[in-house]
Image (spheres, helix red, strand yellow):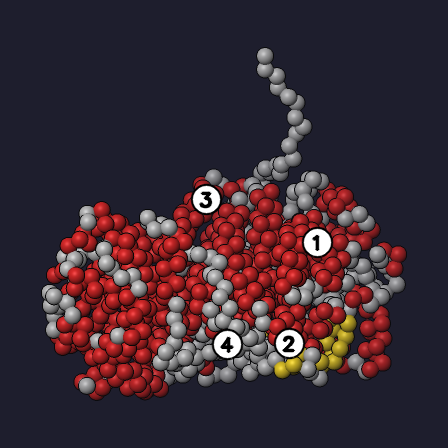
């Protein structure tokens, strides 16, 4: 900034606020929220005259570090186990970032406070930064890491892969449906304020422990912008709270946004941090410990709870249940096991767990080995092709799960699965909260109130549906997860790059055909379906068939 | 005597030699040819850095989005509907792949599936370029203003020019602000590809920046020139008849219903040359020097450069191919001619409402009619670049 103080400059630019006289702007994006013109201030107090040089300086640091990483041969020390999971993460994250940019104009229209629009515009610019800087980081990995497969076809992969579709909620959820539900509550109040802590702070720390200091360089730079976005969300939330009529919607949206973020982010980031690392120091925090600190204490107790006095109804039950899922019900472990079961449907290599990993898990999560150890031993046994099928088609006491129609993560905590006929279709849900989201929240009426702007859950939400009855080799080929020899698979259940140890389409062709659980569910008679549900909720933990894991249930 | 305390070993991750760098082993996909993003066709022979960080980030069900969009609006629309403009690019009327049980993913066989994906921003804007460019502009603008302040350059201004700047240069900030936030930023949710939407976002940055630059310049002048009324621009914007025409047409731009194409076309193709450049280039930048003001033209000049060298460039690159489209050229030309018929008269009427501004200063700028002719010629040239005929309305 020049000689003018930032506060004075910011005050001056408020003179730009526009009150239409001749034409009202077209309101493309609707909301069921109502706003009084409450005089909330722009919390960012940012002017572009200082913003652009500040961001340029941040960029200089990031690109300087990138250059240094290449010159210093960082990739000689990078753990492949870690970087393989980045093929998934970095394929997903540029879309949520750019979607956040796209969501800001939805708020211009929904929040009638011109002063806040300045902060939202700056957030839009930030988000363009984040998306392209992340695409660039991935490009650097592709160019310098030993195995470019999976990075080089990253966006095709992400768009057609079931993990990518799970991740897409963290993008489409920002830009579709009720403008406030999407761009404010789901994006800024929950995703950015709560879950970027694990995404952009906890995960980069783990990257550094695995020899990758570029991910922290980029993502800590990104996170330094996020704090501004959190202020945007807070200002909008306070405006919404000032109108009694909004409270029912706020309660609905916080429940949906919290639970969906937990299901999606904890599934992905929990897996990366716990199963993507080689750092097994006993005093390094587990994901559960990080979650307790960053999300439970810092977000729930320090940010959300004080808002209760303004009338915000906080989903205490769902927050406690999320912790219960992570700590007692093994949510992250179940997800990592499922991703690894289905390694062949993905585009990165998944390393098996070793004795050192087992010891760490047992130390951090007492009882882990009894639940998951045997399965991971089987994973290692079946990792390299040797006349057997991939683990998903072998008998390892694992029942292939049904998908949750809402969050699209499978129903892995089996006892929580609920089934409902919605829109004429039988659907399975991983938890009652996800059933509620589909059947009650995303509807044009909510608890008797008209909610004409609320969005809808659409699309082919069960990935297996598309490939029902297909041979696995054709599935993998159709998705494009094949290397440049036209036969070797991009994904592998181990890290050995010896071509003789790698799975090929020829191996896939011998497998039983893929079956869609949801298609099969809808072909069942009523009694068959009831029996299915009764059996399903008795399964687990670790995907065990009903009756085999009773002694391990918490 | 000094002592060294024994400390327990700190717990830190240990570096491990993994040899995970490119070229360490040979296996399928280990060669140099595997080290490029391979899911799109570059516009030229070699894909650019800009393409790598923008193309295909926004998915398309006609490409690889096999499970389709997973959230919809209440009216059933989802994602980035191609119907959010009436313009058409080849292939858009072809049906989306129908997917269902056992259909497979049906990924695109011949990328791209439709013509919208052929658009590339000739400015190749992404985060690195946009911060470098804008940081340089604000640095230069700041330095110019600071130098002038130190040199007491504002003392040379005649009272009449001070009034002109406080009211009229000040009033212009509102137009830039409205276009930045409520046209360009507002439409960055609507374009059919990431390249369109990113170009709109970057265009909005330029506009918001110049609006703020003008506001902060106004603040500096309030501090430096005795009697400079820092609030006069608000009065001019709200009440001065010479500004009400421009305000009316400017406010009409965010009111365009549900067509990002018309919004951008009407703003950058029609409004900017006929009103924006008319005022910035053909009045302020011509008149200032005669009043001893060498600073205002540099502030305004930054906006001129934004528009001329960057914002207009991407806009022409966006619309020109549509008038030559292999499937919809006639449809698009007809549509754009309709937009010209709609917006040219409004802009010319607004321009003429601004005519008294040309008489308000002591040192006279070029005649209004000459300035307007220049703006019209420039506008006709842009239309020629787009492959459009000059509309009869321009003769009004």
Co-location on one chain, circles 1 and 4 = yes
Dot 1 or dot 4, earlier in sequence: 4
Disc 1, disc 4: CB below 8 Å? no
Bin the neighbour count of mark 4 within 10 Å (Cα to Cα): few under 14, some 14-19, many 20 and up: many
If you read the primary sequence from the N terminus, does the residue marked by circle 1 or circle 3 appear first?
3
**Residue drawn at (24%, 68%) of the image:** B168
Q: Secondary structure at mark 1?
A: loop
Q: Which badge, 3 or 2, comes first in the chain's sequence? A: 3
| Residues tagged by mark 4 and mark 3 found on one chain of the structure | yes
Q: Please state if A315 lies on the left or on the right of A178 as rendered.
A: right
**SS for callout 4:** loop
Report which residue position mark 3 lands on: A65
Looking at the picture, tell me which residue is in the foreground, A261 or B333: A261
Residue A29 is tagged as: 4
Can residue A496 be seen here? no
Whole-percent x and y of residue A425? 71, 81
In the image, A40 versus A445, the foreground residue is: A40
Look at the numbered disc 2 and give the secondary structure of its residue.
Answer: loop
Indicate the chain on which mark 2 is placed. A
């Amino acid at each position: 900034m020049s000689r003018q103080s930032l506060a004075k400059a910011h005050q001056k630019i408020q003179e730009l606020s526009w009150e239409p006289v001749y034409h009202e702007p077209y309101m493309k994006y609707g909301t069921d929220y109502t706003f009084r013109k409450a005089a909330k201030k722009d919390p960012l107090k940012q002017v572009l005259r200082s913003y652009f040089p500040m961001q340029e300086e941040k960029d200089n640091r990031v690109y300087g570090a990138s250059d240094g990483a290449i010159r210093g041969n960082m990739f000689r020390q990078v753990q492949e186990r870690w970087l393989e999971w980045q093929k998934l993460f970095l394929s997903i994250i540029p879309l949520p970032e750019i979607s956040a940019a796209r969501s800001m104009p939805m708020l211009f229209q929904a929040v009638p406070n011109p002063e806040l629009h300045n902060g939202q515009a700056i957030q839009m610019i930030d988000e363009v930064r984040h998306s392209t800087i992340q695409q660039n980081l991935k490009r650097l990995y592709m160019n310098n890491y030993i195995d470019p497969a999976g990075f080089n076809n990253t966006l095709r992969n992400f768009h057609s892969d079931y993990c990518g579709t799970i991740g897409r909620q963290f993008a489409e959820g920002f830009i579709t449906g009720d403008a406030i539900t999407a761009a404010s509550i789901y994006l800024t109040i929950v995703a950015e304020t709560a879950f970027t802590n694990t995404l952009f702070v906890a995960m980069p720390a783990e990257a550094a422990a695995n020899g990758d200091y570029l991910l922290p360089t980029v993502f800590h730079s990104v996170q330094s912008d996020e704090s501004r976005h959190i202020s945007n969300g807070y200002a909008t939330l306070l405006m919404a709270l000032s109108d009694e009529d909004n409270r029912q919607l706020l309660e609905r949206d916080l429940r949906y946004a919290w639970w969906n973020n937990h299901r999606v982010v904890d599934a992905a980031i929990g897996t990366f941090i716990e199963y993507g690392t080689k750092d097994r120091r006993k005093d390094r925090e587990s994901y559960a410990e990080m979650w307790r600190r960053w999300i439970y204490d810092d977000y729930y107790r320090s940010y959300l709870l004080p808002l209760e006095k303004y009338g915000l109804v906080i989903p205490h039950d769902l927050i406690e249940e999320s912790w219960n899922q992570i700590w007692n019900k093994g949510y992250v472990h179940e997800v990592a096991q499922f991703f690894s079961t289905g390694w062949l449907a993905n585009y990165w290599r998944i390393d098996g767990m070793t004795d050192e990993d087992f010891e760490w898990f047992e130390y951090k999560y007492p009882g882990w080995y009894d639940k998951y150890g045997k399965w991971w031993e089987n994973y290692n046994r079946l990792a390299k092709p040797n006349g057997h099928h991939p683990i998903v088609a072998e008998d390892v006491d694992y029942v292939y799960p049904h998908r949750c129609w809402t969050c699209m993560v499978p129903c892995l905590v089996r006892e929580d699965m609920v089934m409902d006929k919605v829109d004429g279709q039988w659907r399975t849900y991983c938890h009652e909260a996800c059933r509620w989201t589909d059947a009650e929240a995303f509807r044009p009426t909510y608890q008797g109130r008209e909610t004409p702007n609320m969005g809808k859950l659409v699309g082919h939400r069960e990935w297996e549906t598309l490939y029902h009855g297909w041979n696995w080799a054709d599935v993998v080929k159709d998705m494009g997860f094949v290397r440049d020899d036209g036969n070797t698979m991009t994904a592998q259940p181990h890290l050995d790059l010896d071509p003789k140890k790698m799975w090929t389409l020829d191996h896939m062709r011998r497998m039983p055909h893929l079956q869609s659980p949801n298609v099969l569910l809808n072909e069942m008679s009523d009694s068959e379906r009831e029996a299915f549900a009764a059996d399903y909720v008795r399964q687990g933990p670790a995907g065990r068939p009903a009756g085999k894991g009773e002694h391990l249930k918490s | 005597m000094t002592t060294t305390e024994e400390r327990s070993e700190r717990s830190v991750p240990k570096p491990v030699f993994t040899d995970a760098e490119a070229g360490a082993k040979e296996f399928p996909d280990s060669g140099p040819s595997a080290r490029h993003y391979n899911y799109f066709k570059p516009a030229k022979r070699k894909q650019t850095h800009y393409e790598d960080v923008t193309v295909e980030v926004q998915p398309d069900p006609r490409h690889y989005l096999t499970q389709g969009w997973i959230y919809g609006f209440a009216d059933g629309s989802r994602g980035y509907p191609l119907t959010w403009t009436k313009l058409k690019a080849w292939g858009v009327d072809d049906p989306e792949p129908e997917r269902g049980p056992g259909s497979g993913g049906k990924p695109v066989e011949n990328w791209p599936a439709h013509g919208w994906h052929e658009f590339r921003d000739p400015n190749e804007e992404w985060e690195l370029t946009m911060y470098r460019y804008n940081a340089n502009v604000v640095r230069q603008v700041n330095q110019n203003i600071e130098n002038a302040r130190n040199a007491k350059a504002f003392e040379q201004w005649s009272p009449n020019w001070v009034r002109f700047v406080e009211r009229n240069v000040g009033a212009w900030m509102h137009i830039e602000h409205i276009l930045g936030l409520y046209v360009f930023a507002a439409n960055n949710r609507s374009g059919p590809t990431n390249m369109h939407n990113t170009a709109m976002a970057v265009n909005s940055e330029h506009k918001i920046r110049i609006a703020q630059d003008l506001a902060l310049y106004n603040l500096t002048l309030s501090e430096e020139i005795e009697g400079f009324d820092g609030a006069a621009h608000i009065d001019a914007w709200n009440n001065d008849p010479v500004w009400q025409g421009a305000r009316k047409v400017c406010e009409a731009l965010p009111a365009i219903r549900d067509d990002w194409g018309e919004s951008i076309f009407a703003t950058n193709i029609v409004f900017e040359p006929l009103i924006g450049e008319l005022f910035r280039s053909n009045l302020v930048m011509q008149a200032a020097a005669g009043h001893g003001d060498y600073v205002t033209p540099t502030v305004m000049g930054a906006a001129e450069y934004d528009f001329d060298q960057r914002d207009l460039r991407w806009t022409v690159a966006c619309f020109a191919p549509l008038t030559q489209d292999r499937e919809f050229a006639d449809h698009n030309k007809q549509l754009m001619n309709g937009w010209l018929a709609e917006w040219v008269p409004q802009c010319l009427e607004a321009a003429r409402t601004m005519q008294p501004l040309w008489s308000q200063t002591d040192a006279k700028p070029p005649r209004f009619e000459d300035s307007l002719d220049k703006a019209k010629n420039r506008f006709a040239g842009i239309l020629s670049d787009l492959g459009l005929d000059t509309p009869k309305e321009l003769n009004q």
